[in-house]
Image (tube, rainbow, N blue to C red):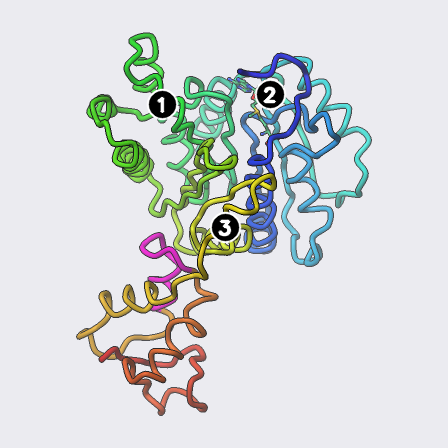
Amino acid sequence: MLPKTTLWPMSPHTEGKHLVLRRYLDAWLPILGSRFGRILFIDGFAGPGAYVGGEEGSPLVALRALAEHTARGMITAETVFVFIEKDLKRAHHLRGLISDLPFKLPRNCTIEVISGAFDETLTEVLDHVEAQKSGLAPSFVMVDPFGVSDTPMSVIRRLLANRRSEVYITFMYDAISRFSNTPEFAPHLDGLFGCDSWREGIDIEDSRESKRFYYDLYEAQLKAAGAENVVRFELYEGKRLVYAVFFGTQHWMGADRMKQAIWRVCSFGDFAFRGTRSPQGSLLLSAPDYGALQDALRREFCGKGWVSVASLEEFVGSDRTDFHCGHLKKNGLKPMEESGALEADNETRKKRYTYPEGTLVRFL
Ligand SMILES: C[S@@+](CC[C@H](N)C(=O)[O-])C[C@H]1O[C@@H](n2cnc3c(N)ncnc32)[C@H](O)[C@@H]1O
């Protein structure tokens, strides 16, 4: 049931979406904010900015990330926040919160709340940017609808046509699998996926296979739309999958930082947030399996001679593995060298079992 009131209670899974968002912005803000003159955070389905229990909504999470950033001095770019919200009362509530924030923002930050629909507003912005031939400033675009009908792939494609835009999209798998056979739903799914191949999923009975089919199709469509790397994680309430969040970026480093953010919130490496009401679900999971990282490295680089640590980082950080650069040396290279599965060129490093920039290694 969609909430009809201006504010609604926050579900446990929403916390996971916000925690990952915050962790990612903690990385994104200084990386992009130190290199560009202007950066843009767009929240396409902003909501009222708060929940009935007083918890902060995504616009406040994003603003707070800037206000409280420990490296705020590095973020020299003008930081522009655009919050789009269709419901007038929710937009009004958000404006009220922004006019009296409990934290202080830097001067070179601007905030705009637009009462409008995501696809129309973004289309206007992108038309304007194209007319100016200026290109969109590096952007992080959060797309967090209640359903599947308002996030057409055509808009996502236009966003991703800009080299430094990234999308963080709520993907309502549950609604898709339940309603894919309902004729009124078909045009919405055509729009969501940007193709009609989703129909091939209707007859898949096995729920795991069905989920995999829709996930793979959405990922493939995001890639066709311009995302070179796609990373996703799932949000559960108890055992029920509520939805997944798909992140698309053109740069392997974006995928790496997003995976770091997800690993910090979902520390078992299962890319699933299970909500605070069900800790026992997480306790049943075992420790992360770094053997999978070592296998991936072996598969990719064995027999290819000497390779630089930089190439290994790019591989591990990209969406081709579930691991991030922070795992590479400690959980990949060092145990592999200790077991004799890897050799390092000692001319390129000073100390055993260390892998500073420039180190060459080969997999045996
Ligand atoms: C899931 S809630 C957003 C929650 C918010 N992102 C957060 O994490 O705190 C979706 C919001 O989108 C708004 N909405 C619905 N359709 C919309 C549309 N087409 N364009 C923009 N906002 C829309 C709803 O009024 C609702 O406030």
**Mark 3 residue element:** helix
Mark 1 CB lies closer than 8 A to ligand 1? no
Q: Which of marks 1 and 2 is nearer the N terminus?
A: 2
Residue 246 falls inside the magenta stretch: no
Other residues around mark 3 within 10 Å, as few (<14) / some (14–19) / many (≥20): many
Q: Is residue 359 above or below residue 331?
A: below
Say which residue label 3 marks: 262
**Quarter for ligand 1?**
top right
Say which residue label 1 marks: 176
Task: From the image, state whether disc 2 or disc 3 is nearer to you.
Answer: 3
The span shown in magenta is: 311-323
Q: In which quarter of the image is residue 89?
A: top right
Q: In this view, does 338 lie above or below 126?
A: below
Q: Measuring from the top left, give residue 139's x and y in whole percent.
A: 51, 40
Q: Measuring from the top left, give residue 251's x and y in whole percent.
A: 40, 51
Quadrant for the C terminus, please: bottom left
- Amino acid type, mark 1: Ile
**Mark 1 residue element:** helix
Q: Measuring from the top left, give residue 133's x and y in whole percent.
A: 44, 33
Q: How far apart are marks 1 and 3 (CA)?
A: 24 Å
Q: Distance between the residues labelled 1 and 2?
A: 23 Å
- Amino acid type, mark 2: Glu
Say which residue label 2 marks: 85
